[in-house]
Image: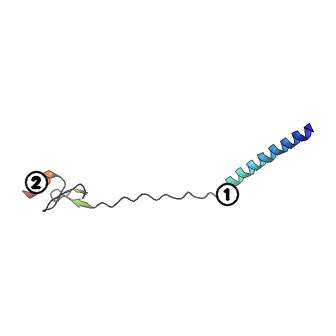
Amino acid sequence: MKYLLIFGLTMAVIWLWQGKRRSNMADKTSPKKPKPQSRPRQLPATEIVACDVCSVHLPRTEALTSGRGVYCSDAHRRQAEG
């Protein structure tokens, strides 16, 4: 009876080892699915304007606007308005 138990345990270990080995081999030979590419996050478009005095380009959100034009700084706004 002791030898039957040892034989059964040995066969179970071999069976588990072979199954693990076969699954690893199948993983290596099967074609890999490419990971889905994540789309780059789209930033909202920013309008670019040029200063009426020095022609420096800057985003409209950072520009100073007045009735006479668009300026990059308060000094240029004062210079253009007189």
Quadrant occupied by the C terminus: bottom left
Nearest the viewer among 23 and 57 is 23
- Which residue is painted at 71% across and 54% down in the image? 26
Q: Is mark 2 on a helix, strand or loop?
A: helix
Local crowd at mark 1 within 10 Å, few (<14), some, or many (≥20)? few
Residue 28 percent location from the top left of the image? 67, 53
Q: Residue furthest left?
A: 82
Q: Which amino acid does label 2 sit on?
A: Arg
Q: What element carries label 1?
A: loop
Residue 54 percent location from the top left of the image? 17, 56
Q: In this view, does 42 lie to the left or right of 26?
A: left
Q: Splitting the image into 4 quarters, where does residue 49 fall?
A: bottom left
Residue 29 percent location from the top left of the image? 68, 55
Quadrant occupied by the N terminus: top right
Residue 38 percent location from the top left of the image? 49, 57
Q: Earlier in the sequence, mark 1 or mark 2?
A: 1
- Which residue is painted at 10% across and 57% down in the image? 80
Nearest the viewer among 18 and 5 is 5
Q: Is residue 51 left or right of residue 26?
A: left
Reading the image, the residue beneath label 1 is 30
- Which residue is painted at 84% across and 45% down in the image? 11
Q: Which residue lies furthest to the right in this view?
A: 1
Q: Which amino acid does label 1 sit on?
A: Ser
The residues bearing labels 1 and 2 have C-alpha atoms spaced at a distance of: 71 Å
* Residues at circles 1 and 2 in contact by the CB criterion of under 8 Å: no
Reading the image, the residue beneath label 2 is 78
- Which residue is painted at 78% across and 48% down in the image? 18
Q: In this view, does 23 lie to the left or right of 35?
A: right
